[in-house]
Amino acid sequence: MTKTFLIFGAGYSARAFARQAVEDGHRVIGTTRSADKFADLSALGIEPLIFEGTTLSGDLVQAMGEATHLVVSIAPDETGDPVLRAASDAIRRQMPRLRWIGYLSTVGVYGDHDGGWVDEDADCRPVSKRSVARVASENAWRELSDEISRPLAILRLSGIYGPGRNAFVNLAEGKAKRIVKPGQVFNRIHVDDIAGALALLAEREADGIFNVTDDEPAPPQDVVAYAANLMGIDAPPEVPFDAATMTPMARSFYGENKRVSNAKVKSAGYSFRFQTYRHALDAMWRDHTWRQKPPR
């Protein structure tokens, strides 16, 4: 059955999903903050609409009435979730065909677990303001989905990379660093696996929380070294964490150390295209896709 997907926030991850959905014969409507991006969205088969974060246009309300599946890929801001703030009443009253909601969140909601493994039942210990806001948004979407009796899949995503956004690009642009903090690991996920997992959960109209992350949490310096080896260049020298120059946001990521399990989404039937960063980097280097320009 053909679905009509309405995506709030047709950015990097959502566009990867949209491409797959269009290829599968579904209709995809996606919002952006600027009409300058309409041509890019249209080229992918996405019907573009404006959502600037505060109000709903008549065209957007009409699209909501036609949508069978809602995907939310807009982060909360300092005053809460923009989509809920602007559209919660319309979701309740003006989406008669709605069957499923997908909300793209982050593994940052788990906070710091001293390098231990966490799954979807683990305590959320958000450290940063942005992760605290994500927990609040997750809870608010759950309350709304329960109120309207529609299934909600919350996808907690790890560090996102893919064509145009990866260690190769950072190395080529001279921006790559090998910052070493003993014991520190990060989870990561290729954008195509976000698209694949989202497509599966939408098809099954799954309900619940799902970690979408690859099989191998790894030290960030290892990823840079592996990419440099594929490129045939010297990796940047290692820099101790305490001596590294970083933005406050970048440094804050190192305050959270955990290993995130993806067993639940696998048990739901998803098979990862790229099980580890090595599989993904090998493929992007082999297929010359690492340079592809990411969506604006």
Image: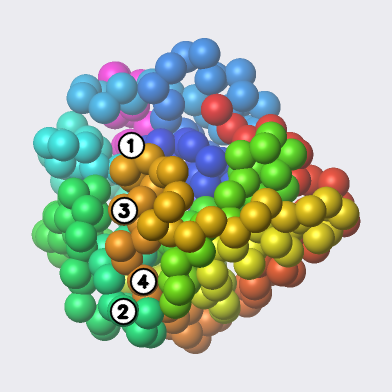
Residue type at the position of mark 2: Asp
Majority secondary structure of the magenta segment?
helix
**Numbered circle sitting on residue 252:** 3
Q: Quadrant of residue 228?
A: bottom right
- C-alpha separation, residue under disc 1 versus residue under disc 4: 39 Å
Residue type at the position of mark 1: Met
Element carrying mark 4: loop
Element carrying mark 1: helix
Residue type at the position of mark 3: Ser
Mark 1 is surrounded, within 10 Å at the Cα level, by few (under 14), some (14 to 19) or many (20 or more) other residues, namely many
Element carrying mark 2: loop
If the image is split into quadrants, where does the N terminus sit?
A: bottom right
Whether tag 2 and tag 1 are in contact, CB under 8 A, the answer is no
Q: Earlier in the sequence, mark 2 or mark 1?
A: 1
Q: Earlier in the sequence, mark 1 or mark 4?
A: 1
Q: Is residue 65 magenta?
A: yes
Mark 2 is surrounded, within 10 Å at the Cα level, by few (under 14), some (14 to 19) or many (20 or more) other residues, namely few
Magenta range: 57-68
Q: Position of residue 170 (x, y in %)?
A: 65, 42
Residue type at the position of mark 4: Asn
Q: Earlier in the sequence, mark 3 or mark 2?
A: 2
Mark 3 is surrounded, within 10 Å at the Cα level, by few (under 14), some (14 to 19) or many (20 or more) other residues, namely few
- Give the residue at the far front of this rendering: 243
Q: Earlier in the sequence, mark 3 or mark 4?
A: 3
Q: Which residue was labeled with disc 4?
A: 257
> Going 50% across and 64% down the picture, which residue do you hit?
180
Q: Which residue was labeled with disc 1?
A: 64
> Going 21% across and 25% down the picture, which residue do you hit?
54
> Going 79% across and 46% down the picture, which residue do you hit?
289
* Colouring convention used in this rendered image of the protein: rainbow
**Numbered circle sitting on residue 114:** 2
